[in-house]
Image (cartoon, grey):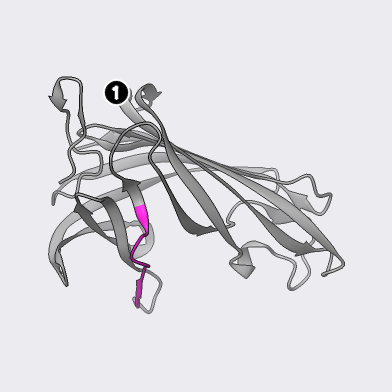
Amino acid sequence: MLMFAGCGGARGTLFPLDAGRSWDYSVTTTVLDQTVRSTMQVRALGTVDGEDGPVGVIEYPGNARGYYVSDSDGVRRVATRRGIDGRMRRDGPKHFILRSPFAVGTKWSLTSQLTLVESVFYEAGERIRDREVPVTLDFSIASAGETVTVPAGTFRDCLKVSASGSAIVRVNQGANFGHVDVEHTDWYAPGVGLVRSERRESSGSPYLKSGVYVQELAGYR
């Protein structure tokens, strides 16, 4: 397990992988000016043997699973399994969720996809999310002492991780291009894990609508 060391010594793992841990989240998603509120549960299933040692398994809604390695370099996602076919998809060697040292200024990058910004048109081929548009996000640890209040309570000494990136997409049936900016922020509480996540995908293009995603911890054990 990764331990966050700061003033006063170790304060607890930021990304728990212990079997039996679970987290309940409230989720608010706004796409095409429509806001949907939902809940989701995430569960730690324990570890399995990997090529280079133990791999932690996290179960997400829809029977999706993420496979994580926690070592001196940080926390990496090494594979995912999702969908009806249940096929395993391996990540690259540097798909870091958190990178050490856990101190302000630590930086890393990874490739994500546009999931919130959407075309104002409904014609075939216009929908952004159907295209799986990649976007490179540059992450950095912005703070190691945040206080965050969510439905599950108030958490102190949280690690704040900020990320940003941009992408260019074809819009208006390929006649124009739209610029999309992505801002993503996560807060991790020692001994608990992810307590809040925010993502905004915005564009000034008249052919695109911006989107927002907020995930807050509602309960955990």
Question: Against 205, is 125 above or below?
Answer: below
Left or right: residue 187 compared with residue 57 = right
The spot of residue 148 in percent (x, y) is 38, 23
The spot of residue 68 in percent (x, y) is 25, 58
Q: Residues within 10 Å of mark 1 (few under 14, many from 20)?
A: some
Residue at image coords 71%, 59%? 168
Relative to the observer, which residue lies in front, 208 or 104?
Answer: 104
Residue at image coords 70%, 43%? 33
**Count of numbered circles in the view:** 1
Question: Against 177, is 199 above or below?
Answer: above
Q: Which residue type carries mark 1?
A: Asp
Relative to the observer, which residue lies in front, 191 or 36?
Answer: 191
Q: Is residue 94 magenta?
A: yes
Q: Which residues are magenta?
A: 87-96
Question: Against 144, is 124 above or below?
Answer: below
Q: Residue furthest right?
A: 175
Left or right: residue 157 compared with residue 176 = left
The residue pinned by badge 1 equals 157
Residue at image coords 63%, 69%? 131
Q: Please identify the quadrant where the C terminus is shown.
A: top left
Q: Secondary structure at mark 1?
A: strand
Q: What type of secondary structure mainly makes up the magenta span?
A: loop
